[in-house]
Image: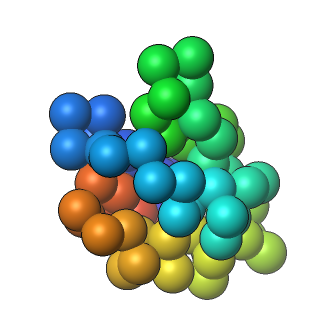
Amino acid sequence: MRAYVNKDTCIACETCVGICPEVFSMDSDGKAVAISADVPLDEKNSAIRSRDECPVSAIDVKE
């Protein structure tokens, strides 16, 4: 499973980082980035929750 962040859509609210800091971080521009190439199995549900709770739908999680 992989996580992706659309930086053009991201509003830097840090919701994803708060939910799943093992997968998401904020970059020097203040936008979210996926810091893990592959989502660890034990973080799968948190990554999906981050996607679902992103207020601007900037996150995608794919198998």
Q: Can residue 15 be seen in the rendering of this structure?
A: yes
42 vs 50, nearest the viewer: 50
Q: Position of residue 32 (x, y in %)?
A: 49, 40
In this picture, residue 26 sits left or right of residue 2: right
Residue 18 in the figure: left or right of residue 50: right
Residue 55, above or below 22:
below
Q: Residue at x 76, y 54 (%)?
A: 22
**Corner quadrant of residue 58:** bottom left
Residue in front for this viewpoint, 32 or 43: 32
Left or right of residue 25: residue 31: left
Residue at the top extreme, as displayed? 28
List x then y, in percent, for residue 47: 56, 69
Residue at image position (59%, 35%) is: 26
- The residue shown at (21%, 44%) is 9
Q: How is the image coloured?
A: rainbow
Expressed as whole percent of the image width and height from the top left, the position of residue 25 reads 64, 41
Residue 49, position as x, y percentages in the image: 51, 80
- All told, the count of numbered labels is 0
Q: Is residue 40 above or below residue 7?
A: below
Asked whether residue 37 is in view, the answer is: no
Point out the image quarter for the C terminus.
Answer: bottom left
Q: Residue at x 53, y 64 (%)?
A: 15
